[in-house]
């Protein structure tokens, strides 16, 4: 993948993560944070399999999905 596109994906991930701290609705927080985590996983994959980026963001993404599906708010 084009390194410039990968960089934009990384910056987008950061924006989504920061935005999730600004929101008040828990469901929206989880969705926006999950989008950021997905972007970070993509960024980590296309930047040479950066496992310290891929693993925690992948896990957080699954946690967000779990809470969104089960309706838990805390």
Image: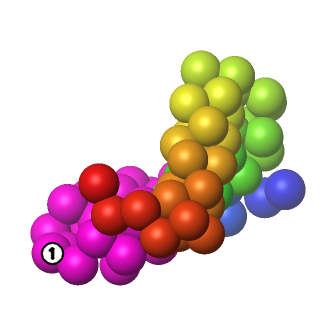
Q: Residue at x 60, y 61 (%)?
A: 65
Residue 73 on image: x %, y %: 33, 64
Specify the quadrant of the image occupied by residue 23: bottom left
Residue 47 located left or right of residue 20? right
Q: Which residue is mark 1?
A: 24
Q: Quadrant of the C terminus?
A: bottom left
In the rendered image, the vertical position of residue 5 relative to residue 51, given as above or below:
below
The crowd level at tag 1 (other Cα within 10 Å; few <14, some 14-19, many 20+) is few
Task: Specify whether residue 27 is in view.
Answer: yes
Overall secondary structure of the magenta section: helix
Residue 66 located left or right of residue 13? right
Residue 20 on image: x %, y %: 29, 65
Residue 51 on image: x %, y %: 69, 22
Q: Which residues are magenta?
A: 8-34
| Residue 9 among magenta residues | yes
In depth, the one of 73 and 15 nearer the eye is 73
SS assignment at label 1: loop
- Residue furthest to the top in view is 52
Q: Residue at x 59, y 21 (%)?
A: 52
Q: Quadrant of the N terminus?
A: bottom right
Task: Specify whether residue 9 is in view.
Answer: no
Residue 32 on image: x %, y %: 42, 71
Residue 56 located left or right of residue 4? left
In the rendered image, the vertical position of residue 35 relative to residue 47, given as above or below:
below
In the rendered image, the vertical position of residue 3 relative to residue 50, given as above or below:
below
Q: How did the renderer colour the structure?
A: rainbow
Q: Residue at x 55, y 47 (%)?
A: 63
């Amino acid at each position: 993948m084009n390194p410039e596109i990968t960089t934009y994906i990384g910056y987008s991930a950061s924006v989504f993560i920061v935005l999730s701290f600004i929101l008040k609705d828990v469901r929206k927080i989880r969705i926006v944070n999950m989008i950021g985590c997905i972007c970070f996983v993509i960024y980590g994959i296309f930047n040479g399999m950066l496992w310290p980026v891929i693993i925690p963001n992948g896990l957080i993404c699954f946690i967000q999905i779990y809470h969104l599906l089960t309706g838990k708010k805390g």
